[in-house]
Image (cartoon, rainbow, N blue to C red):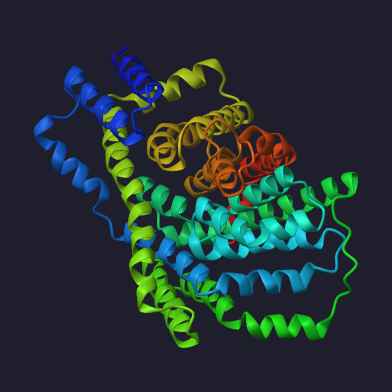
Amino acid sequence: MLVALGLAFILLLLFLAVPFWVALGLGTIALLLSTGALPLSLLGEALFQGVDSFALIAIPLFVLTGDVMVRSGLAYKLLDFAEATTGSLRSGFGTSTALGCGFFACISGSDAADAAAIGRITMARLVDVGYPKPYACALVASGACTGILIPPSIAYIIIGLVLGISSSTLFIAAAIPGVLVLLGVVLTNVVVNRLNGYENSRQGFSFARWFRALNDAKWALSVPFIILGGIYSGIFTPTESAAVAVAVALLVGVVQGTIRLKDFPPMLETSARVNGVILPIIGIAMLFAQALTILDVPQALVSGLTSITDDPTALVLVMLAIFIIAGMFMETTPNIVILAPLLYPVAKQIGMDQIHFCVFMITSLGLGFITPPMGLNLFVMSGLTGTPIMSIARRAVPFVITMVAISILVGFVPTLSLWAIR
């Protein structure tokens, strides 16, 4: 009952438009005072321990890498290469936009950064080739969902920290499901395009143009190669690969003259702002999760769910529903820190591997970026274009259906998550 009242208090504060980390912090303090789960004298130490992790240094570094790629023009080279590869297809520029989102996901690790970067580059051209602006926004917002699904991913760094799993291992496990989501976005756009006749590319494929685009994009492609190659080969940890990627992107930008000394302060400020939003939420949410664990809430949740049904299929679907609903109302970071410790015991009860559970959870939470009322990517695209959020959300329905289907597939086919690491 005290836990339920604490959650109700947090929801009330959120309803009153109190910032999430403040609402969660006040709710956690109220819970600690009412239950005595943890002495308040240890509050500062617990908060510090929540963010005292070497792995978290990768978060601002990946965000900084993405910003450097945009400011240096390297992100444009990636999109040009994607267009040279798929531009001759009937829905060529829509496909290359989705692939551009996937390329950028291999660099930034953030959905919002992916949507903002690719949206700025592609929106005018998408409208010019025939896509209605609301649908073009939905396409970019959906493609940008791969930001937390394709490694390197901030979400996998956080869930690895929460459950004590190597983020390098999670990056390897997430590769196939992440690419599946990207292909799902591409195929959905192809189907919608054919049904509505938005785009009909007449441009033929040219090997000369493709090799020219590949040559122009060689330095841009080197950044995701360094990040993923370094991690998968074991040469770098995710944090080290992020640092090397920042250094390489900066060096290329400075040598090419696209980045100047005056660009450094705004780039560092952007990274600091993102980090300043994420880290307080992580610290407080981990304290909240610790209090719930002390109060045996995870065990009670397992008992409650298994008393209703012990069918693994039903429990996987229940977890999927929880992830989707939670993603609609909360950001990914608090969802991970709060729900992972609560629901992993349920997954363990039905024999789900820990790594499989992590990939299933992040894939399912990815839907929250294109589903209102939270829908962060919807807000980003609306802010960029002035298009009403609900207009974008309606056009995103086919992509939501596709991503739900892929989440179900990931939940019931462990091989998709575990094959690469085994």
Tally of numbered tags: 0
Nearer the observer, 144 or 403: 144
Q: What is the quadrant of the C terminus in the image?
A: bottom right
Vertical comparison of 55 with 80: above or below: above
Q: Position of residue 403 (x, y in %)?
A: 67, 42
Vertical comparison of 230 with 290: above or below: below
Residue 234 falls left or right of residue 199: left
Nearer the observer, 288 or 81: 81
Residue 63 falls left or right of residue 131: left
Residue shown at the point (52%, 42%) measured from the top left: 376
Residue shown at the point (39%, 71%) measured from the top left: 263
- Which image quadrant for residue 237? bottom left
Nearer the observer, 213 or 420: 213
Q: Position of residue 44 (x, y in %)?
A: 14, 41
Q: Position of residue 117 (x, y in %)?
A: 56, 60
Q: Position of residue 16 (x, y in %)?
A: 37, 22
